[in-house]
Image (cartoon, helix red, strand yellow):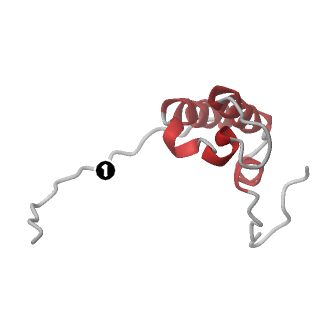
Amino acid sequence: MFLTQPLEQELVELPPLSFGEVQDRFCSAIQNNPDYWRDDEAIAGEDGPPRDEQELLDEMKAQVMRARNVPELISNLWEEDLVWVGGNPPRR
C-alpha cells in the first residue's frame, strides 16, 4: 500500500546562465555525485586495467570544459546523435 501526500512546489525563474556557468555547474554535479557518473566497469578493469575513479571523473569534467556549446557538451558525454531542427548543427 502506498500512502500519498500532497506536495507543494513553487517554481522560481532563475536568471540566464552563461555557457561557462553551465559548464561549472555540470562539473560540480559530476564531482558531487560520483555514484551517478562513474564508470564501474572501467574502475573494476573489465575492459582493461582498472582505472582510478577520480581520474575518470576528471576526464569527464575536462570533456565538459572542452565543449564550445550545449550540443557539443551532450555529444562529448553521451555520444548521442542529436537531431537538428530548423538549422545546421554547430561546427566542430
Q: Quadrant of the N terminus?
A: bottom left
Relative placement, left or right, of 24 versus 66 is left
The residue under the point 55% across, 30% down is 31
Which residue is at a point 71% across and 48% down the rendered structure image? 46
Can you give x and y, in whole percent of width and height, for residue 52 in the image?
68, 29
Residue 18 is situated, as x and y percent measured from the top left of the image, at: 63, 35
Outermost residue, right side: 92
Check the image and report above or below for 42 versus 2. above
Front residue of 84/6: it is: 6
Residue denoted by label 1: 11
Position of 52 relative to 74 (above/below): above
**1 vs 20, nearest the viewer:** 1
Residue 63 pos. (x, y %): 76, 38
Q: Is residue 85 left or right of residue 12?
A: right
Taking the spot 11% from the left edge, 61% from the top edge, the residue there is: 6
For mark 1, does the 10 Å Cα neighbourhood hold few (<14), some (14 to 19), or many (20 or more) residues? Answer: few
As drawn, 82 above or below 43: below
Image coordinates of residue 53 in percent, x first then y, are: 63, 31
Residue drawn at point x = 71 percent, y = 42 percent:
45
Could you tell me which secondary element the residue under label 1 belongs to? Answer: loop
Along the viewing direction, whichever of 52 and 77 lies nearer the viewer: 52
